[in-house]
Image (tube, rainbow, N blue to C red):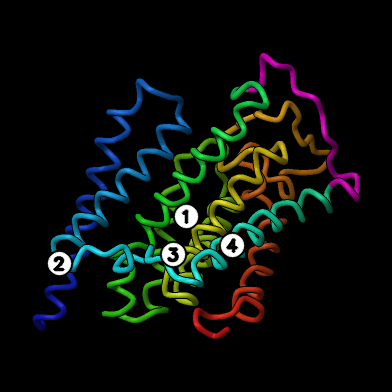
Amino acid sequence: MRPDQLRLLVRVLVFVLLAVLGQMVFPALMRPFGDLLVVAALSSFAAGAVANAVLVRGWESGKPSEFGLGWSRDAGREAATGIACGAGGAALIAGISLALRMATFEIVPTAARGWSGIVSIPVLAIVLLFGAVGEELLFHGYAFQQLVRGVGEFAIVLPVGIVFGLAHMGNQGVTLLAIFNTIAWGVLLGCAYLRTRALWLSIGLHFGWNVAMPLLGVNLSGFTMGVTGYALRWQTTDLWSGGAYGLEGGLGTTLVVMGLFFLLYRVIPERGSL
């Protein structure tokens, strides 16, 4: 093994070790302070932040740009574009379903809402933002970026996307189609990094999609949030609706992810191309 290959292997292994330890330690520490969704989101953020910070402080100069979070004139545009595309894709599925009478909105009794009350929407949005940033740091942060440089772009994107999908296998209501769609999302988010060489677009896509789910009244990866007081009730099969897993378990998401790939490579500009 060449010295550069050995350095890459050591860095990736240290990153993975820190990430795994973080995902074991932080949920245990945070469990008394919130429900499962809050614990999962904040634990992912904490584990991702610690793993990236330790590696860039230990082997690099410690700048956020060394794990994809350097701020530039493109960063805000990329984040906003990602949010619009992610939320727009979810809204498109819901809009078509409502127009074709495949679904209707239904009032949810207060006792069954979970995160009860409209005041919880900003809090939930912040929690989901932390969760999106955390997952991007874990799956497409320093280790992913080092592997892209050392091994090759498309040799790494698919394996990491598969790991991203398999990491959701324990979620409630999961199906084979849900895992397939989540893997496709993982590949899309990895390609968003390749397109921009930063995490802002992938964070925007991730957050925009996630935050749209509770606003549309549907489950997010098996989590029921119910903050709006209404829910999307389906008059179709789980093949389209995704069942208990949410839209990510349905064919609508499969089609939307294909459309987002098209936008990524045909419409969204590469960083520095404007």
Which residue carries the number 4 mark?
82
Does 180 appear above or below 212? Answer: below
| Cα–Cα span, label 4 and label 3 | 10 Å
| Cα–Cα span, label 2 and label 4 | 30 Å
Badge 2: residue crowd in 10 Å (few <14, some 14–19, many ≥20): few
The mark that comes first in sequence, 4 or 1, is 4
Q: Position of residue 166 (x, y in %)?
A: 43, 52
Residue that extends furthest to the top in the rendered view of this protein: 111
Which residue carries the number 2 mark?
59
Which residue carries the number 1 mark?
165
Q: Residue at x 47, y 55 (%)?
A: 165
The mark that comes first in sequence, 4 or 3, is 4
Q: Residue at x 54, y 60 (%)?
A: 185
| Cα–Cα span, label 1 and label 3 | 19 Å
Tell whether label 2 touches label 3 (CB within 8 Å). no
Which residue carries the number 3 mark?
199
Closer to us: 78 or 179: 78
